[in-house]
Image: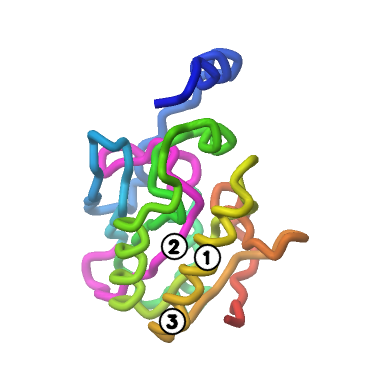
Amino acid sequence: MLKDDSAKKYTMTKMKKPVYKHPDFVIKTDDKRIEKENKRLWLSLQIDSDLKDSLVVILKNPSRATKDISDKTVYTVTSYVHNNRNKYSQFKNIGNVIILNLIPYYQTYAELLATSNLNIIDKENEQTIIELTSMHKNVIIAWGDHPKGLYKEYEELKRTTFDSLKVNKNQVYYVDKLSKNGNPKHGQVWGYDNELKEYKL
């Protein structure tokens, strides 16, 4: 819950967000949501039933996507992988895309996270990142710059995530470019022709 009505007022000033369906090439979906805490720990999207490898993509925080509906970010990320599966060897054997987040709480407008009573550094989410990156080699980081008012917390989340990726010896990538703050381009604004690049841990 927010400390005041700022989320309601903010949302009312915005245009209604469109509802996205998962792309037609997505065969099966699953997720782990904690409804009472309004958070999602992971979202899994199967894009090829014959291929067994999984790709992990780490974003900022969930907007709206569940196993039943998509959102702009998840739609763009899965479409990028699908559209470029013949271009990049890293995607050639990917049958499943797993979406994780630095912050697990649903909020379409990330700048409102700082005005919430949420514990942004969520230990259950951190453990989820550790476990799933230990199981799957290829990881794309795509979380964008920090939400307003959460710079310190965001830096800590990035640090613990990078520590996990180092321990698990993941192959880490980003798309297109890093921001002036050194953050990877957010998945929502990937272009399908943007280049996949290796990230040096």
Describe the element under mark 3 as helix, strand or loop.
loop
Span of residues in magenta:
48-75
User: Which residue is labeled 1 in the image?
Assistant: 141
**Residue 86 against residue 170 in the figure, above or below:** above
Callouts 3 and 1 close, C-beta under 8 Å = no
Task: Say which residue label 2 marks.
Answer: 57
Left-right relation of 135 to 151: left
Q: Amino acid at mark 3?
A: Asn
Q: Contact (CB < 8 A) between labels 1 and 2? A: no
Q: CA distance from mark 1 to mark 2?
A: 6 Å
Distance in Å between CA atoms under marks 3 and 2: 12 Å
Reply above or below: 70 against 83: above
Which residue: 70% across, 65% down?
182
Percent of width and height locating residue 93: 35, 77
Measure how far apart labels 3 and 1 are at the Cα level: 11 Å
User: Where does the N terminus fall, quadrant-wise?
Assistant: top left
The foreground one among 75 and 82 is: 75
SS under mark 1: strand
Q: Is residue 32 visible?
A: yes
Q: Is tag 3's residue or tag 1's residue first in the polypeptide sequence?
A: 1
Horizontal side, residue 51 vs residue 200: left or right: left
Instruction: Judge whether 171 appears above or below 162 on screen.
Output: below
Closer-to-camera residue (1/19): 1
Disc 3: which residue? 170
